[in-house]
């Protein structure tokens, strides 16, 4: 049985630094995506003249975490990063970045240059707290992109609202195995799926409230009335 070359994990971005190497249209796309995550700092370096486009400069002006450098990437840039994404077509640069990153144990994604990749850039769908990432281990990115577009059309607004309501319910309940099992049972309830598909937020909220009441309301301390 063939083994998958990459195990899908979600990297925690809070407090960390992202280095984007190369601008242009693809770099702008990478920067737009990066701004949606809680990076402490996002550094972008230019590899060619006019790499830092007007769009990129505007994205940087709108987000004070973004730091632009109109020059090639240096080893010092890599040393400050927790993740490096190379969006260029430069094979020699990818080899150099790969060497710098390996020496410092920093993961590298190099666009369409599989031998230098420690991580793969996924096709991403965002629905509120939900983030769906599709990867193929760098083998079929075009198919991943096609699947992403299909899922974007198939996953309506109900999934966004359900994710937000369930996240709120999770925060409202005491942590532990009972909360975990309650949420699992609720997520498997066919009535919730129906409400999601219909984007019926009232029905979603009622199902959530009923589940919380059934599981936790008896935990409240009782006092005797005079």
Image (cartoon, rainbow, N blue to C red):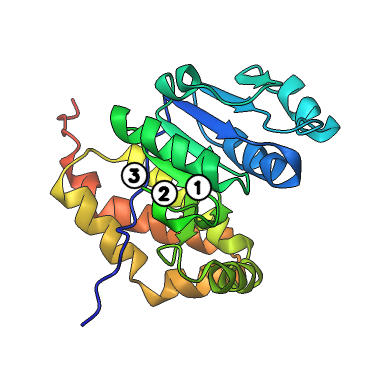
Picture quadrant of residue 172: top left
User: Would you say residue 15 is visible in this rendering?
Assistant: no
Q: Marks 1 and 2: CB-CB under 8 Å?
A: yes
Q: Read off the residue under disc 1.
A: 110
Task: Residue at 30% x, 51% y: name it.
Answer: 213
The circle on residue 116 is: 2
Quadrant, the N terminus: bottom left
Q: Residues within 10 Å of mark 1 (few under 14, many from 20)?
A: many
The answer to which of marks 1 and 3 sits earlier in the sequence is 1
In the rendered image, residue 98, in percent from the top left (x then y), is placed at: 41, 39
Asked if residue 11 lies left or right of residue 146, the reply is: left
The picture places residue 220, in percent across and down from the top left corner, at 20, 37
Residue identifier under label 3: 170
The kind of secondary structure element at disc 3 is: helix
* Residue at the image position 81 percent from the left and 33 percent from the top: 53
Q: Position of residue 49 (x, y in %)?
A: 79, 30
Disc 3 crowd, CA 10 A, few/some/many (<14, 14-19, 20+): some
């Amino acid at each position: 049985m063939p083994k998958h070359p990459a195990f899908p994990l979600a990297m925690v971005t809070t407090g960390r630094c992202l280095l984007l190497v190369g601008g242009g249209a693809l770099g702008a796309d990478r920067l737009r995506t990066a701004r949606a995550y809680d990076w402490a700092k996002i550094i972008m370096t230019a590899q060619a003249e006019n790499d830092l486009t007007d769009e990129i400069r505007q994205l940087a002006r709108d987000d004070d975490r973004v730091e632009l450098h109109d020059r090639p990437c240096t080893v010092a840039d890599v040393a400050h990063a927790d993740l490096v994404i190379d969006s260029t077509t430069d094979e020699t640069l990818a080899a150099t970045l790969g060497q710098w990153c390996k020496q410092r144990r920093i993961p590298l994604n190099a666009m369409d240059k599989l031998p230098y990749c420690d991580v793969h850039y996924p096709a991403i769908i965002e629905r509120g707290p939900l983030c769906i990432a599709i990867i193929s281990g760098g083998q079929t990115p075009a198919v991943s992109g096609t699947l992403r577009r299909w899922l974007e059309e198939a996953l309506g607004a109900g999934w966004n609202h359900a994710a937000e309501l369930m996240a709120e319910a999770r925060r409202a309940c005491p942590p532990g195995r009972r909360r975990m099992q309650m949420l699992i049972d609720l997520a498997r309830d066919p009535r919730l799926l129906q409400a999601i598909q219909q984007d019926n937020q009232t029905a979603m909220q009622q199902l959530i409230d009923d589940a919380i009441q059934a599981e936790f309301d008896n935990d409240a301390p009782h006092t005797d009335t005079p």
